[in-house]
Amino acid sequence: DGGITQSPKYLFRKEGQNVTLSCEQNLNHDAMYWYRQDPGQGLRLIYYSQIVNDFQKGDIAEGYSVSREKKESFPLTVTSAQKNPTAFYLCASSMGPETEAFFGQGTRLTVV
Amino acid sequence: GESVGLHLPTLSVQEGDNSIINCAYSNSASDYFIWYKQESGKGPQFIIDIRSNMDKRQGQRVTVLLNKTVKHLSLQIAATQPGDSAVYFCAETLRDSWGKLQFGAGTQVVVTP
């Protein structure tokens, strides 16, 4: 089936650790995105990538890093510099401008 | 410490009735709009989209209306069913912004029997 796969579904991190969230798509989409969702709120853009080997900061990029070495993959690293990382993280992809974004099922990250 | 979750606006609808969910968008230059449905613990699902050169678009049981004069978007769901219970988000994007969506805060729809 075509789609976006995020893993793991649940992730626990100790304070001071970096963790990496996986996002893979087989839709042949050029653009990929990472959003953060806090309880009872909308989605906020962390990073996005329009093509391989290129990515741009979104509205809340501080404390996060990404890479885009392959078209299919756009991993997100939550670094120890992110002061409040507990949230629901959503990856999405789209074909290009003015096209719908397809979302994965999310990763819930909790700092313990 | 942990952030306190905000209470989403809630729309309570009786099964079989029509639902209308409203959204005020922020940027008058936005030219593409999408409605998403999000069930608890899942990613958003596309419902319907509309471009700024249109004021109405219909899908299966859903209609989106766009009023650019007042920057208002609405989603109408006909004959609301229990499976329609979810949080609904509107999202806007600018031309050539490569799908960078700006999301509204969302509306919780609760369908009662």
Image (tube, rainbow, N blue to C red):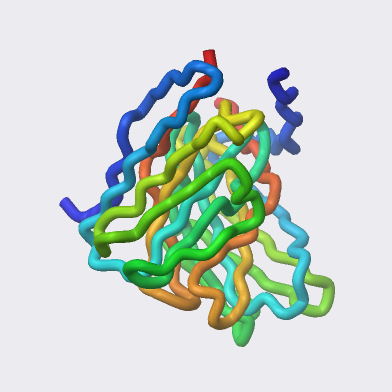
Q: Residue at x 47, y 77 (%)?
A: A97
Q: Position of residue A84 (x, y in %)?
A: 64, 29
| Camera-nearest residue between B89 and A47 | A47
List x then y, in percent, for residue B9.
75, 38
| x and y percentages locating residue A21 in the rendered image | 38, 38
Q: Residue furthest right?
A: B70
Residue B76 sits in quarter: bottom right
Give the side of residue B80 with respect to residue A1, left or right.
right
Residue name at image x 60 percent, y 83 percent: B54
Taking B21 as reference, is A27 left or right?
A: left
Residue A39 at what x, y percent from top left? 64, 30
Vertical position of residue A87 compared to residue A27: above or below: above
Q: Is residue B81 visible?
A: no
**Quick one: B78 or B22, which is closer to the camera?**
B22
Residue A53 seen in render: yes
Residue depicted at 72% across the width and 80% down the height: B29
Does B30 sit above or below residue B76?
below
Image quadrant in which you'd find residue A106: top left
Dividing the picture into quarters, in which one does residue A95 lie?
bottom left
Q: Is residue A40 left or right of residue B7?
A: left
